[in-house]
Image (spheres, grey):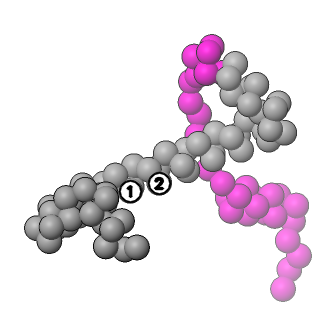
Amino acid sequence: MGLLTAASVCLTLCYMKSTTLTIRLDRDLDDLLTKVSRRSGKNRSEIAREALRRQLRISRFEGLRRRIMPLAGARGYLTDEDVFTEVS
């Protein structure tokens, strides 16, 4: 087997590492992101990734909830309290 060159290792690592997303922030959001970054010790990208991950999970949950509500209603589960009462 031949040796890997530095260029091929770099290309492989870059491909495997991640993708890039560019977004535009208004001044207020940019300032807030910078303040939170300084306060938390996390870089801006980490905070943005966490926020995006959290928002996507919320959106997924809401979509699942919309799909399941008619089935739950048909079984008498009309509110969150109905579900909590049954589970606890």
- Which residue occupies the foreground of this view, 68 or 9? 68
**Range shown magenta:** 1-30
Which amino acid, mark 1?
A: Phe
- Which residue occupies the foreground of this view, 23 or 76? 76
Residue 18 horizontal/vertical position (percent): 66, 54
Which amino acid, mark 2?
A: Arg
- Dividing the picture into quarters, in which one does residue 78 lie? bottom left
Residue 63 vertical position relative to residue 45 in the rendered view, above or below: below
Number of other residues with Cα within 10 Å of mark 2, as a class: few under 14, some 14 to 19, many 20 or more:
few
Residue drawn at x 77%, y 33% as measured from the top left: 37
Residue 15 horizontal/vertical position (percent): 67, 58
Distance Cα–Cα, label 2 vs label 1? 6 Å
- Dividing the picture into quarters, in which one does residue 40 lie? top right
Residue furthest toward the bottom?
1
- Report whether residue 20 is seen: no
Residue furthest toward the left?
74
Residue 57, numbered circle:
2
The residue at which mark 1 appears reads as 61
- Element carrying mark 2: helix
- Report whether residue 80 is seen: yes
- Which residue occupies the foreground of this view, 63 or 77? 77
- Dividing the picture into quarters, in which one does residue 75 lie? bottom left
Residue 32 horizontal/vertical position (percent): 68, 23
Residue 66 horizontal/vertical position (percent): 24, 55
Whether tag 2 and tag 1 are in contact, CB under 8 A, the answer is yes
- Element carrying mark 1: helix
